[in-house]
Image (cartoon, rainbow, N blue to C red):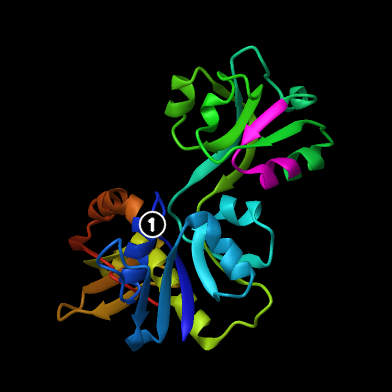
Amino acid sequence: MLRIAVPNKGSLSDPAIRMLSEAGYRQRRSAKELVLVDEANDAEFFFLRPRDIATYVGAGQLEVGITGRDLLLDGNGGAEEVLPLGFGRSTFRYAAVPGTAATIAELSGKRIATSYSGIVRHDLAQRGIEAEVIHLDGAVETAVRLGVADIIADVVETGATLREAGLEVFGEPIMRSEAVLIRDARIDTTPRIEQLIRRLHGVIIARRYVMMDYVCAVESLDEACAITPGIESPTISPLHDDGWVAVRAMVEQGDTNRVMDELWELGARGILVTDIMACRL
């Protein structure tokens, strides 16, 4: 039975549960459920603190899990990223009171508060900068005001919390994070793990694309196919009217209306768009 770690709370929890559900796995209906067995898919889900997931997977207690890339890299190793999942995106950056520091070089000799001490120490070592790293478990943005640190390093989504604390980011992002599927790096990929990866990848593609159907004149077909090339190539079907064909192709969701406009101008008609619930490519 494949043992899978899932965030039990926080910004990654609901999207992870929703993605697994769309991938065909049974998921918990109450936040009180800490362990759930999905016998139909030969899987067992453990709902854990996001920060602990990389530790459990890296230690071999669980085969795979979903967590943030930042939490994975901040851990002690043993787990590796398998698949980016496309949600929970954020950047990890340095921030300070305006006028305190404006470049990464000015970190030298400073006190830096963070909940991600592993990432910060690695970044400083790569840059050849010596600074004191102060580990805090939360509320990092108040560390400067309370005199605990000169600078902070934290996950930034909108930056609103930092601005409220009188801080502003500077320098290039330390890293860009998102939810990722991780696995124990010491084990071989099993058929169950491969199945999970295929299913999640199918959900990612299904969310990104829509299916577009339309009819167009045969003489316009080459131009129409250039507008809707699909993943490999569009599907072309003859109609009863010899002068027309039906075309079906996957189109990126964000381009839907632009593509429809271009097809209409070309003379295509009967343009229909439908969602893709799941796929295997």
Where residue 91 appears, as percent x and y from the top left, is 54, 40
* Quadrant location of the C terminus in the rendered image: bottom left
Q: Nearer the viewer, residue 246 or 256?
A: 256
Asked if residue 21 can be seen in this view, the reply is: yes
- The region drawn magenta spans 111-121
- The residue under the point 52% across, 87% down is 191
Q: Quadrant of residue 69?
A: bottom right
Q: Is residue 127 found left or right of 155 in the rendered image? A: right
Where residue 70 appears, as percent x and y from the top left, is 58, 50
Asked if residue 224 can be seen in this view, the reply is: no
Q: Nearer the viewer, residue 113 or 157?
A: 113
Mark 1 crowd level (few <14, some 14–19, many ≥20, 10 Å Cα) = many
User: In the image, what residue type sits under mark 1?
Assistant: Ser
Asked if residue 131 is positioned above or below residue 179 in the image, the reply reads: above
Where residue 79 appears, as percent x and y from the top left, is 64, 66
Q: Could you tell me how many numbered marks the image carries? A: 1
Q: Quadrant of residue 115?
A: top right
Where residue 165 appears, as percent x and y from the top left, is 48, 21
Of helix, strand and loop, which one carries label 1?
Answer: helix
Q: Quadrant of residue 21?
A: bottom left
- The residue under the point 34% across, 76% down is 25
The residue at which mark 1 appears reads as 13
Q: Is residue 123 found left or right of 162 in the rendered image? A: right
Of all residues, the one furthest to the right in this rendering is 128
Q: Nearer the viewer, residue 148 or 175?
A: 148
Is residue 189 covered in magenta?
no
- The residue under the point 78% across, 30% down is 131
Is residue 118 covered in magenta?
yes
Q: Nearer the viewer, residue 235 or 80?
A: 80
- The residue under the point 31% across, 48% down is 258
